[in-house]
Each structure stands twice: as C-alpha cells, then as structure tokens.
Amino acid sequence: MNGSSLEAACFDLYDYTEFFRAIRSVTETRRHRELKFSISEDVIELLIRPLYGRQDSLKAAVRELLQNALDACRMKKKEKEERGEKESGAEITVRLEKGGEDRFLEIRDNGIGMDAEDVRSHFLTVGKTNKRNRRLGTVGKYGIGVLSVFLAGDYAEVYTKKEGEEPLAFKLYIKDSQKQVSWIEEGRAAGRGSAGRFGDGSGTAVRLRLDDAQRARLGETNPPDGLLPLFGLDAYMTEEGTRITVTEASAGFTAILPSLPPEASFYRVNDEIRIYRAGWPAAGTAGEEETDADSAARGPEKGKERICSRKNTVFFNGMISPATFNWGGYTMLQKKAIPFIALNIANLDEREGEFGVALSRESAELSGSIAEGIARGIYDMETDKAADLIKSRADSLREEKAGAEGLKDTLQRECAVFGGCDILLEAMQEGERKGCQRLLVSADRNLRHLELWGRGGRAEEIFCDPQRRPLRLCGYSMSKREIADIIEEERLIAISVRYLDDYIGNATGPSNGLRAEAVRRILKAVGVNYSQERDTSEKLWDFIRRRREYVRSQYTGKSDQGLLWLKEEFKNSYEHQFDNERLILFDSSWLENPADPAFCAVLKEKIKRQGLADLIRVQG
C-alpha cells in the first residue's frame, strides 16, 4: 500500500492498544504541504465496523462528530480562561439539508478550530488522541472520529479556522476503494467554506454527504417527530453554556436540545459529581418511563425530565451514556437503579482505571474514587431523608402513640437503600425508655436474633424473648424447604397450624410436604407415636396418609390459638386466633441483608447529631 509492505496481524478487536497500533501502521502517509490519507477498505470493514457493529451507523457518526465538536469548544474555553478572556459559550449546529438529489448532514461548532499542523498531526492521525485535551476532560478518547463519516456517507468536506489563522478546507472521499483526503482549493475554502462559516472567529464544520441507505431512511422520516430519534438526539442534553441546535432546512424544522436542569435539582457531592435528586426513587417503586416518541411529542423540556429520570445513566463532560458501577464495599447499592449522574472530570489520563468508556460512548463503567463519591452522595441523601422521617415521628414514638414497627415499614417504603436492608426491632435495656422498642441497623452479618415470618403487628403480644435478642420481622410466607431446614436445625420456636396443614396434614408425600426428618421431629414434638426412625420417606408418608386425622388432631390439640410452640419459654398469653395465618418464629445467627459499614458510619453520625439514638441504634 503506497509502496509499503503490509504484514498480516491477528489481535482481539476489544484490545484498543493493538487496534490503533495496527491501523496507524497502514493508514497514514503525511507529506510536507500535502495531505495524503488512505485507508484500506478491508481495514474499515474488518476493524471499524465491528467495533460499531451493535450501533446504528447514523447515530454513531453523529455522536462521534458531536464528540469532536464538544471537545473543540471545551479546548477553546480553556484557552480563553488561561488568557483571562471571557468565552461567549459553545454553539453547535446539526443541520440536515438537500443538495439536488443528495442529502447533506453538517455539524458545525464555534470551537478552537484547526491549523494545518492540527489537521495533519491530530485530525487525520487515526488512533491518536491529544493528551493535553484529555487533561482538559475532553470527550474523545480513541482518536477515530474522522473515520465515523464513512459509516453513514461516502464523501465529506471539512471546513475549519483557528483564531488568527487562515481558513482551511479539505475533503474525505473514496477513490479506487480507498478512503482518501485532499485539500480543497483555497478560493473555495475562503468563499462559501471556512471564512464564510466562521468570519473572524474560529470553528470547524464537517459536511457529510449521506449514502443511499441513510437517504432512504430520511425519506421515511417526518420532522420533527422522527428526526431527533433518527440522529440519536432524542435522549441528549447539553451542559450549561453549550447550545446544540438541530435544523432541517427544507421542512423549516428547528429544535434546541435541552440543557441540564438547574443546580438546585442536583445533590452536589463535590466539583466532579452531582446526583439528580428527583431521580432517586422510594424503595420498590419503578415508574413507567416514557418512550422516545412520547418525549419528542412533548417537547424539549418534557424530554429533559424523561432523560433525567433514566436510571444508571451518566452525563459526562457534555455527553450521555448508560453506566455500570463497580461498588466494591458499598453493598447496599448492588442491583439498585442509580439516579441520573452528572460528572465533570478533568485529568482523565490519571483516572483511566476509574472511568472506562466504550467506543462512541455506548456505555461507561465507573469504579474507584468516582464510584465511591457517587455512593457516598447517595448515602448522604438517604440518611438525611431517614433522619428527617425518624425526627418527624419522634414525639409519637416516645409517647408510645406509635410503634417502632410502623417506623421500620416507613423507612423501608420511603428510602430506597433501606428497602434492601434488614431493620430489626430491639428492646431498650436502659434509660428513660427502658423496655420500649427501637430500631436496629447492623453491619454485622453474624448477629444473633429472632425472626418472625408472616403478618406482623403483634410480635410483643405473641412472645417474649428471655434473652432480649433483636427481632427481624418479615411479612412473607416461607417455603417448605426453608421450614424443614429450621426444624432440622432445632431453631424453631413456634409455627402456625396453617403451615402444618399445608406441609403435613394435607400433604401426600415429600413432593408437596416437608422432608422426612422434619416430619419426624414435628410428630415427636406433638406426641405422635411413630418409633420407626429408620423407615424410608415412603413408609413415613404412608403412615401419615393412614393416620391423617390422628396426626392432625395431635398438632391441633397441642397448639394455642392456632400456634404450636416448641419452646414454651418464649410464649406469651394472647387472645388472637392464628388458625388461618401462616406464621413462623425461629432463632437465627445470620442476617441476610446487613447494612454496609460505610452506610452505618454516615447514619450513626446523623442519628447522634440529631439526638435520635433512643429511637434507632446503628451497629458497625
């Protein structure tokens, strides 16, 4: 190629370092005062397209060109600041227009622009990113934005002007199955090209002639309903000081993309991280998200609300990406839908291990101090809300007009993090409220406690623990496997007759009843004379089927108001009938969903500061 030999190389397409080393070795030839940039058709088909393979080609091209435009505006702003000058703001236009039978897409910015050296050294150097730009927090990372034009078109013109420099223009095109570049004659560049676009200012415009496939798609689109989704801009926002305008000249369509909500809409963790307040849901809520078509129909401001309501999404230095988070020790956020996050991160070269971004911003992965900052911000928001809820009910709780169980339910309903955390009840051992209940949040998984499964609200009435252990209330039914485990491990304190009917009295065998060993232990506890300890499961269930009424009368007769007590020392005197309820009480040394230490540290400090330690205790 171009007089050079080409060696075959095999490497993983996901290894960007090898990819760019290989593509640079075969794609660029630079000469003094002349541009020559040729790329093998095989390189495009075998390397570039697979990397964008899961993405819409037009959307990918628009995103890449917008990345370049945003980076250029960010660089210009930084240079102005360094010179003590004020920047008027970033202006970017995405324009669709007709030219005879052709359709052209132009993306124009008022950014820093390029001189000839910039064009040669950066714009046309595939796989090379400007390290200085990365220190400014620019978006582009992989240095392949220029190639994206060939995903959606077959010819492009680039017009650019740097402040104080002459305007430049060059074209990207296909010749003999090669992607090539050459200057556009000076007169044309100075006429309707660069100078005409930027005047005395600076900027860059990329004007792409769309290929047949894209023109066909546009022919089926009816602006304004479909143009923004077609470009992938229906879920797009801008940062403060940046305006992106989308126009379609022939239809007279113009839309200004929405900007981020005002600062008051965010919880500011630090200068890098902001969390959208309204995006953090109550536990168990999952509001219906609007479709892209709904959003477009409702206009930019409504579209802004929809975008910010998206979960696991980050706005990073001017662009939006779906995100995944490596939470490490922040276990309470695992599998949680994280609210919209706005990030502003500079010095990316120093943060490569904390912020990973896929090609064309298809997705982002956050870890390290960035994920930690987000986690601590969410914990701050949640603990503030929890402290306010507890404080609002403090008087009623202290005057015993309301119970701790109701507060527990409120916290788990209203606070998303608490929704996945075990909150226990415990009796105060000292102080003015000695003997009264308060809540317990623990980071210790190995915690001795009792568990009451079934409908709550009567725990104090039903039993009294001589050891005064904390109590976990669970409003769910328990499976026969779990019940059998508890019985066989001798942890069962009480079980309702309804459960015994389900899994012994009305069961026909191990397929719908308890395991044989658990059945034997229950029969022994209620005085059923079955001495064949070594009988098979089949013989045991044959005995139950033959003596069903006798077995049922034994456990029913031993029960009290529908509860069978295996450990009488826990039993209180009560009047409520439990015949039709599924209830089970047992002891446990394993907390299924403890709080994580970081959350406990934040919550403990706020509880102490607001004098609420008699209503909730934080351990760990």
Image (cartoon, rainbow, N blue to C red):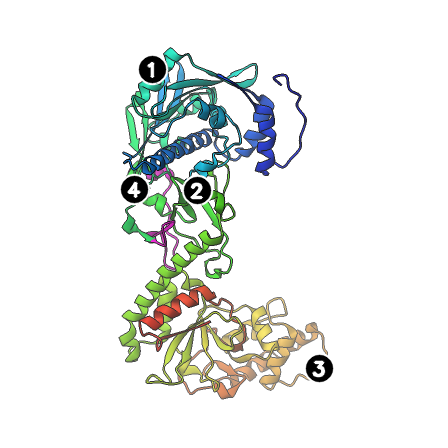
Residue placed at 56% from the left, 79% from the top? 491
Q: Of marks 1 and 4, which one's residue comes earlier in the chain?
A: 1
The magenta-colored residue range is 268-295
Residue bearing mark 4: 302
> Which circle, 3 or 2, is nearer the viewer?
2
The span from disc 1 to disc 4 (Cα, nearest Å) is 38 Å
- Identify which amino acid the numbered label 1 is placed on: Arg
Residue placed at 40% from the left, 34% from the top? 71
Taking 55 as reference, is 433 above or below it? below
Does residue 546 show up?
no
Taking 275 as reference, is 26 above or below it? above
Q: Secondary structure at mark 4?
A: helix
Residue bearing mark 2: 321
The crowding category of the residue bearing disc 4, from other C-alpha atoms within 10 Å (few below 14, some 14 to 19, many at least 20), is: some
| Magenta-drawn stretch contains 277 | yes
Residue bearing mark 3: 532
Q: Of marks 4 and 2, which one's residue comes earlier in the chain?
A: 4
